[in-house]
Amino acid sequence: MAYDLVIRGGTLVTHEGTGAGDVGVRDGRTVAVGDLSRTDGGEVIDATGLHVLPGIIDTQVHFREPGNEHKEDLESGTRAAVMGGVTAVFEMPNTDPPTTTPEALADKLDRADGRAWSDYAFYVGATPENAETLGELENLPGCCGIKIFMGSSTGSLLVPDDASLRRVLENSRRRVAVHAEDEERLKARARIASEAAHPRAHPEWRDVETAFNATRRLISLAEELRRRVHVLHVTTREEATYLAGHKDVASVEVTPQHLTLEAPHCYDRLGAFAQMNPPVREARHRSGLWQAVANGVVDVIGSDHAPHTRDEKSRIYPKTPSGMPGVQTLLPVMLNHVHAGRLSLTRLIDLLCQGPNRLFGIVGKGRLAVGYDADFTLVDLAASREITDDWVAAKCGWTPFAGMTVTGWPVGTIIRGRPAMREGQLIDEPSGRVMRFYEGAGP
Ligand code: DOR
């Protein structure tokens, strides 16, 4: 059998476990997995000494285009993705204008065409005004689902009250992704932030109850309406325990930031560069999140890549915007946690590949298996490197993980059989494509 590409001699990480093997690719798909040492022809990538993972999928990034291209755009954001070994992204709707109409979604798809390095899909933002149209919007080609902001964050999107939340849930069918912070409580406590004038107050303003109240309200409606919800960036031990009892309706995302950084230390060291919503909290929450990773409650890890410029982050808190870049550091930071024994490589692949596939029904992605897209992330588990600001391809040019030495590094990104990054160098031109979903329309 002739292949366009053979990845030879690596350690494959598949649904079966981890073992030596080769992968054969034809027409952008995986067509053979096993011992292909006797085949010739086509391009060969020597993966000796490397692990071959299914392509990493980041299900939460903010790329800022249109409206705030000085922070990031679809080209730079997806470039950062492939530099970090990420083959596909779900991009968030809090752009300017927000992605709340068919026209805004079509505009993003036009902009991504020919400029995206990784594959992509876009969330549509829910508002009280578009609630009745969400059933159509969520099925448009290129849409990965609906996003709800229950509390104000970056941008104008907001579904603050239960009556509007109910309308959004009633008018849609696919799994809805939710930023769960309680708007009323945020407003009532805003003085804590302005009086403190230091980001150390961020987790006090946006406290445990702010997150937990919203999550309880959401789950109670989801159970009543029998709707599936995806609780984004869970940050508290309390929510992790509560959500374990509601897996019938809720899937759970955590981020590398919340699994790695810790309050108050991160605010003393990084100031507003550690500020995000919901906030990085104290060590007891971080260990609660790790427990939820270990016991299977967490379904996916998303980076919540949310870049802002150094100037914007250097204002006086709370005038500083919330969010930090992360799409490029997602895999190195998590591989380092694998190296430290906090989770297995198999579990990491469950969280970054199979989890997204299972929750969102992405056609042909999330597994290293025959018949799937030939998306692979090649990693050197023995490589020890320091994460530096100069390595960051995102426009903001900084990362909260600068100075951290990690063991485990992405050295190759292959998307539908085409190498996009090798040894830190981009290859050829952007060739990302829009993803398709089992639910929702195909392009
Ligand atoms: O910290 C955050 N930044 N949280 C969000 O919910 C939005 C994000 C952004 O877009 O900046």
Image: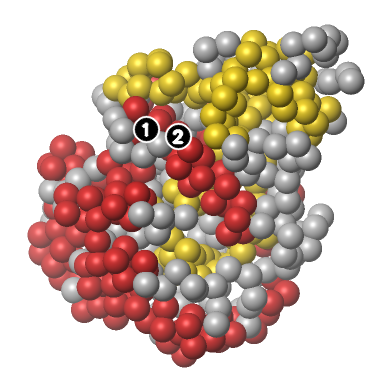
Place of residue 216 in the rendered image (x, y in percent of width and height, measured from the top left): 34, 78
Place of residue 11 in the rendered image (x, y in percent of width and height, measured from the top left): 56, 21
Place of residue 109 in the rendered image (x, y in percent of width and height, measured from the top left): 71, 51
Amino acid type, residue under disc 1 in the picture? Val
Label 2: state its secondary structure.
helix
Q: Residue at x 58, y 68 (%)?
A: 175
Q: Residue at x 41, y 55 (%)?
A: 296
Q: 380 or 9: which is nearer to us?
A: 9
Place of residue 376 in the rendered image (x, y in percent of width and height, measured from the top left): 63, 30
Q: Quadrant of residue 85?
A: top right
Amino acid type, residue under disc 2 in the picture? Leu
Crowding near the residue tagged with mark 1, few <14, some 14–19, many ≥20 C-alpha atoms within 10 Å: some
Q: Earlier in the sequence, mark 2 or mark 1?
A: 1
Q: Is residue 437 above or below residue 130?
A: above
Q: Quadrant of residue 215?
A: bottom left
- Which quadrant would the C terminus be assigned to in this image? bottom right
Q: Residue at x 45, y 69 (%)?
A: 247
Q: Is residue 362 above or below residue 428?
A: below
Label 1: state its secondary structure.
helix
Q: Which residue is mark 2?
A: 345
Query: Relative to 361, is 406 on the left or the right?
Result: left
